Image (tube, grey):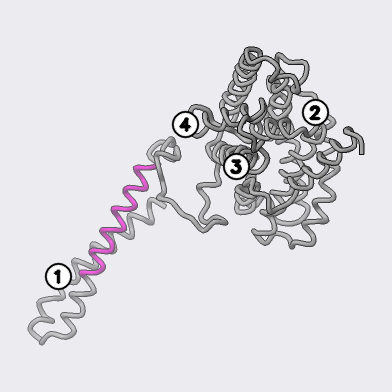
């Protein structure tokens, strides 16, 4: 077996590993706005799901894939070939600095171009997972790591110190290039994993079944190929959102009544930028005070009613006045709430 065939076989093997759902890359950490779209009524059947898929893949290809492409090329900055990076220590340090500078710049640019908090959170979680996967599963175990291992480890350290964001497109392009996966296959793999994650979320949300999701995943090849034909040569400077509605739906994920992971949070929250709308948080605080008042007045009314019914005739004759006042206050509170609604 010659060296070229061996490299090709290794690349194929790595692709099989990346497409394995057991690979700990955090690929199922988000639904790309599908859950929000379902609750909002935008995805109700198979036809609307296919429309959501095609739009999401195209939007993802235009907004995220150019950063993967630029990061993949960034590893080659200042060197004719990565095999010779360790020949001279001084040149190796210079190349390392150039590569890190470009990667950090792309990471900062992607964070600036990503408008909503939910997408940023999912992107950073998956990016960290990619760097951890490389460090624990694919890095050189020798005492002296090579140039590629050093780049990944250095960037991973910056992310852990929260100096850099570590977004998924940057980490994905970096890891696949360091593993020797070609650019064309990296781009295909990136969009394939995205489409698979959406369909996996559709199964968990009970929109479609597991068998039909595989049929749809096969059909997604057409969407991926069409998107790649338009975006495979784009760079990060021309990255753009093609569907603002998808961006809004993704940003609304934390405001859903329920979510797949069965977690909840206090609502509203200033940390989640819920209080930007005028008087929104004040109205919720007023509603909370009203609920507390209703609970107190209602509880007193019931306790007084029980004491009246269990008391003697003299107590019943005098206590109805107090009970009437409590019911009146409770009724006024409910009337005010109905007017506000």
**Label 4 Cα crowd, 10 Å radius (few <14 / some 14-19 / many 20+):** few
Nearest the viewer among 145 and 73 is 145
Nearest the viewer among 263 and 153 is 153
Residue mark closest to the camera, 1 vs 3: 3
Where are the magenta residues, as a range?
281-300
Residue of label 3? 129
Are circles 4 and 2 on residues that touch, CB within 8 Å? no
Residue mark closest to the camera, 4 vs 2: 4
Marks 4/2: CA–CA distance: 33 Å
> Which residue is located at x 81 percent, y 32 percent?
182
Q: Magenta span: helix, strand or loop, mainly? A: helix
Residue of label 1? 322
User: Element under label 2?
Assistant: loop
Earlier sequence position, callout 3 versus callout 4: 3
Earlier sequence position, callout 1 versus callout 4: 4
> Which residue is located at x 67 percent, y 62 percent?
206
Q: Using the image, tell me which numbered label, if any, was put on residue 161.
A: 4
Q: Using the image, tell me which numbered label, if any, was put on residue 232.
A: 2
Residue mark closest to the camera, 3 vs 2: 3
Earlier sequence position, callout 1 versus callout 2: 2
| Residue 225 percent coordinates (x, y) | 85, 37
Horizontal relation, residue 320 to residue 202: left or right? left
């Amino acid at each position: 077996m010659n060296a070229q065939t061996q490299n090709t076989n290794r690349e194929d093997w790595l692709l099989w590993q990346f497409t394995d759902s057991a690979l700990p890359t955090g690929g199922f950490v988000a639904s790309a706005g599908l859950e929000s779209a379902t609750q909002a009524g935008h995805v109700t059947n198979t036809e609307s799901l296919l429309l959501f898929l095609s739009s999401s893949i195209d939007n993802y290809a235009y907004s995220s894939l150019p950063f993967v492409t630029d990061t993949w090329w960034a590893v080659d900055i200042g060197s004719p070939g990565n095999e010779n990076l360790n020949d001279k220590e001084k040149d190796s340090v210079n190349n390392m600095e150039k590569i890190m500078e470009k990667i950090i710049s792309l990471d900062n640019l992607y964070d600036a171009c990503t408008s909503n908090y939910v997408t940023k959170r999912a992107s950073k979680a998956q990016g960290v997972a990619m760097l951890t996967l490389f460090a624990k599963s694919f890095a050189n175990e020798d005492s002296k790591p090579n140039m590629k291992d050093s780049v990944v480890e250095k960037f991973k350290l910056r992310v852990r110190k929260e100096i850099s964001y570590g977004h998924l497109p940057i980490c994905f392009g970096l890891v696949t290039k360091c593993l020797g996966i070609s650019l064309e296959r990296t781009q295909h793999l990136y969009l394939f994993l995205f489409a698979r994650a959406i369909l996996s979320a559709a199964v968990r949300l009970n929109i479609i079944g597991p068998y039909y999701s595989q049929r749809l995943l096969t059909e997604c090849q057409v969407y991926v190929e069409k998107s790649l034909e338009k975006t495979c040569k784009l760079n990060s400077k021309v990255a753009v959102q093609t569907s603002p509605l998808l961006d809004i739906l993704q940003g609304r994920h934390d405001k859903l009544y329920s979510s797949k992971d069965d977690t909840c949070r206090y609502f509203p929250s200033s940390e989640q930028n819920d209080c930007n709308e005028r008087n929104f948080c004040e109205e919720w605080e007023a509603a909370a005070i009203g609920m507390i008042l209703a609970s107190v007045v209602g509880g007193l009314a019931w306790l007084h009613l029980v004491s009246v019914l269990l008391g003697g005739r003299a107590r019943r004759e005098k206590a109805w006045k107090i009970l009437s006042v409590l019911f009146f206050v409770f009724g006024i509170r409910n009337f005010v709430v109905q007017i506000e609604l």
